[in-house]
Image: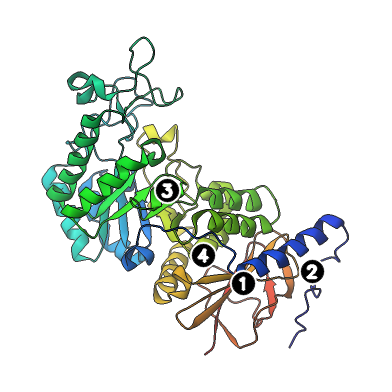
Amino acid sequence: MLPKQLGWCASYDEVDNVNRVVRASAVFIVSLSLALGAFGDTAPHPVADWIRSAVVYELNTRAFSESGNFRGIEDRLDNLKDLGVTIVWLMPISPVGQVKKKGTLGSPYAVRDYYAIDPAYGTKDDLKRLVAAAHTRGLKVIVDVVINHTAWDNVLIKQHPEFYKKDAQGNIIPPDPAWTDVAGLDYRNPQLRTYMIEMLKYWLKEFDLDGFRCDVAWGVPVDFWDTARAELEKVKPQIVMIAEANQPDLLTKAFDLDYAWPFMHTIDDVMENGLTAQGIMFNWQKEHEKFGKAIEMRMLDDHDERRVIGRLGERGMLAASALIFTSDGVPLLYNGMEAGDTTESRDPALFENLKVFWDIVKVRTQFLPFYKQMIALRKAHPALQQGETEWLRNGAQDRVLTYIRRGAGEEFFVAINCSNQPFAGVAEIPDGEYEDVTPKHGDEAANKVSPPAVVLGAWEFRIYRKAK
């Protein structure tokens, strides 16, 4: 058995500068504060167990399949079920505005008619069939709703110009000067609020949807969302609401999940830009102090970001995925991510028809098995879902993360190398025997050691389950 003191590390130089000493001391302070429960305490909206244990999958209907429609999604539902996701999120499915549009097709987030479906995607019956097919497989379906703004040719512009934000001269304006393809809505108008709530109820009633992802939720008043949630629950009590925001008050009544943007950006700062790995731990603590017991959606990729595989590379992406799937919160997968797809979708690609290149899985053979096993491991063990987190010291705090996930009588130890430098050392973990349960990712045959010893290649990770 190797010694458990912090200093042993076969590939780690002695601490030789003040900054490194300060960082190591800070880790101990944070660990102590976590052990003492030094988090803020909010009263978030009660979240159903099926949401707490969920894995969300965002897809772009036009890009997800060769046909680019609802039938193309339906044809891949078995793949999604086999992958292990539980909530399928469809990006906006309404007709796209053509006035002032960006790119060839325009943005799905410039909605022309809130009560219509883009004919390119199919009919209302096609959507009903897709939702029913998903439900038979145990999958929930939510759609993206965009009610902060509309397309410039939305039917409301002529019917209800009083619904829109205006400048001093009375001209309708975008919600943000850079968002030139959309017009901002003014929620000081009570009739607009009534219109939007009735519209949301229509989609639940007509298509048996399971909830909504709400675009730019931070741009719409909190009290509107609180009222909307109460009204929507009268139609379907068990819904899920996801806010595109990082705002605790939205989780008090209206929303179940919001975006853990700071966590994602900190991962990028560490793995892409070389900042100390402890930044991830510090951000985690800061967000918990801010949000208390509320739940956030943890992601690496979505339609607004440059693809994570482009930011972090193949191995960095898998290491970062191991982090979000062993963290608290609800993880998100995006549109071909499980295959290692590199096809961009953010601005300006968001306005074009760029298909997921599914055949790349033949080259990135480790991706699909990793995500299937990682999701299955998480779903089988509540400790990896919403269990407690305890950060641990190790011999390379600036580039290696080590932590415990604990709950429901189980304990997991996770070690993640956030750098391209190998590591061999120890982590200060509780006594006990640990079984390696790391999903396959190309390195599973190497570095067979037992905690507290930790041996990691570049961007490598290990997940251990403590024997009972």
Q: Which residue is mark 2?
A: 11
Q: Is residue 165 above or below residue 200?
A: above
- Residue name at image x 44 percent, y 46 percent: 302
Q: Earlier in the sequence, mark 3 or mark 4?
A: 3
Q: Secondary structure at mark 2?
A: loop
The picture places residue 170, in percent across and down from the top left corner, at 33, 12
Callout 4, which amino acid? Answer: Ser
Q: Are marks 2 and 3 in contact (CB under 8 Å)?
A: no
Q: Which residue is mark 1?
A: 35
Q: Is residue 342 in view? A: yes
- In this picture, residue 288 sits left or right of residue 219: right
Of circles 3 and 4, the one toward us is 3
- In this picture, residue 320 sits left or right of residue 234: right
Crowding at dot 4, Cα within 10 Å, few <14 / some 14-19 / many 20+, comes out as many
Callout 1, which amino acid? Answer: Ala
Q: Secondary structure at mark 4?
A: loop
Q: Earlier in the sequence, mark 1 or mark 2?
A: 2
Callout 2, which amino acid? Answer: Ser
Q: Residue furthest top?
A: 169
Q: Which residue is mark 4?
A: 327
Distance Cα–Cα, label 4 vs label 1: 17 Å
- Residue name at image x 76 percent, y 59 percent: 23
Q: Which residue is mark 3?
A: 249
Q: Nearer the viewer, residue 287 or 75?
A: 287
